[in-house]
Amino acid sequence: MPFEPFLMERWQSTWEHHVDVNLSESGVEPLTADALIETDPDLRRALLEQPLHYVQTNGTPALRARIAALYPGATEDHVEVTTGGAEANQVVTWTLIEPGDEVVVMLPNYMQVWGLARAYGADTKGWRLVEDTAAGRWCPDMDALAEVVNERTRIIAICNPNNPTGSCLTADELDAIGVIADRVGAYVLADEIYRGAEISAEEETASMWGRAERVVITSGLSKAYGLPGLRIGWIAGPTDLVARCWERHDYTTIAPSALSDLLAAHALEPTQRARILGRTRAILRENYPVIAEWLTAHRDALTYVPPAAGAMLWLRYNHGGNSSELCERLRTEHGVLLVPGDHYGMDGFLRIGFGSGSEELKDGLSRVAEALRA
Ligand SMILES: Cc1ncc(COP(=O)(O)O)c(C=O)c1O
């Protein structure tokens, strides 16, 4: 099985806890357990009385029901709970891909599905979003997608809202992807982990759910909900596929953590969900103007297309050097961690997170400014 290191995760795993300021994150400042539970005495008791056993291994019925409620027409059998969105992507690709298949991946993208597909013997083909400064977003080119998809295409993998650009596909664009997938019987694997983290829109980004014959959604609580430490993700898809994924799950992590399953069901209770996503949007709406103003002051060096969702900006820099070298200098000389465009196969870009506490964000930005001056 060919193995290519997952460059961005390796970079973050190695350094994120060893820098003064971490601006490599794509989600908002995580909640504490206390802020999640608030003063709910029943939940506190339930948490302390929770047996630390294996829960139902595909997720408790209570949690799967809460997740199913997010997808019209879905039942508990359409849902499998995983350890983070990462395991959801891993189990789905492992289940679907046979050596020699083709997997079409929207680019730029969180490169997990790209790397896994290659490890499972698929040929990966990129489908590039196009930077459209006039439209103010990274746009899909449907003709290009129709051209790259063929009878060998097993999966069209999209990430919506997109990591790293923060751009969102519209409902019509998702429908058009569905038509192209249906033409060849491919699955659309939609990683929607940033859905709910819209910066100015009140409406949640459209979901791929229900828009093609074979749709599988991967998502979780790590980004839009600010709960990465719970390590709760999920797969929502056709019941037969979800059942096959569950069989694979027996070989990976078996079951979600009992405490996390309980807390996740609480986080997805409709009132709590609205509270938590409201907090995320409040952080984004407070921090985005701070970084936008900073970027206006540095527009000679850094340009960008404004993101619609997520806590990250995809910056094009004109300094000319290599992005990995630039990030290494930012880390070693200025104590601040960013993600190099290289990790997305797009040198000349940097990913910067703006979801952290505002003091940390300002500190990080002043360190990047210092580096730009140097
Ligand atoms: C698009 C996308 N999917 C999945 C993940 C992994 O999520 P988790 O931390 O829930 O495993 C990330 C993490 O950055 C991501 O950006």
Image (cartoon, rainbow, N blue to C red):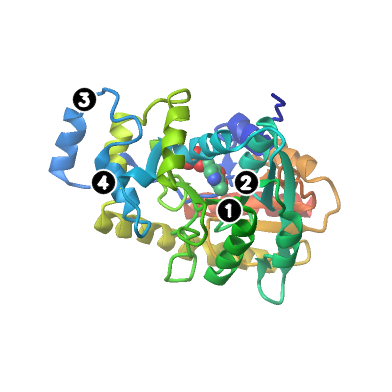
Q: Is mark 2 within 8 Å of ligand 1?
A: yes
Q: Of the two numbered discs 4 and 3 on the same chain, state the one appearing first in sequence.
A: 3
Q: Nearer the viewer, residue 318 or 144?
A: 144
Q: Is mark 1 within 8 Å of ligand 1?
A: yes
Query: Which residue is denoted by mark 1 in the rendering?
Result: 159
Q: Of the two numbered discs 1 and 4 on the same chain, state the one appearing first in sequence.
A: 1
Dot 1 falls on a residue whose secondary structure is strand
Q: Determine contact: label 1, label 4, CB under 8 Å.
A: no
Q: Is residue 169 visible?
A: no
Q: Determine contact: label 1, label 3, CB under 8 Å.
A: no
Marks 2 and 4, Cα distance to the nearest angstrom? 28 Å
State left or right for residue 113 relative to residue 74. Answer: right
Query: Which residue is denoted by mark 2 in the rendering?
Result: 110
State left or right for residue 238 relative to residue 99. Answer: left
State left or right for residue 238 relative to residue 102. Answer: left
Q: Which mark is residue 51?
A: 3
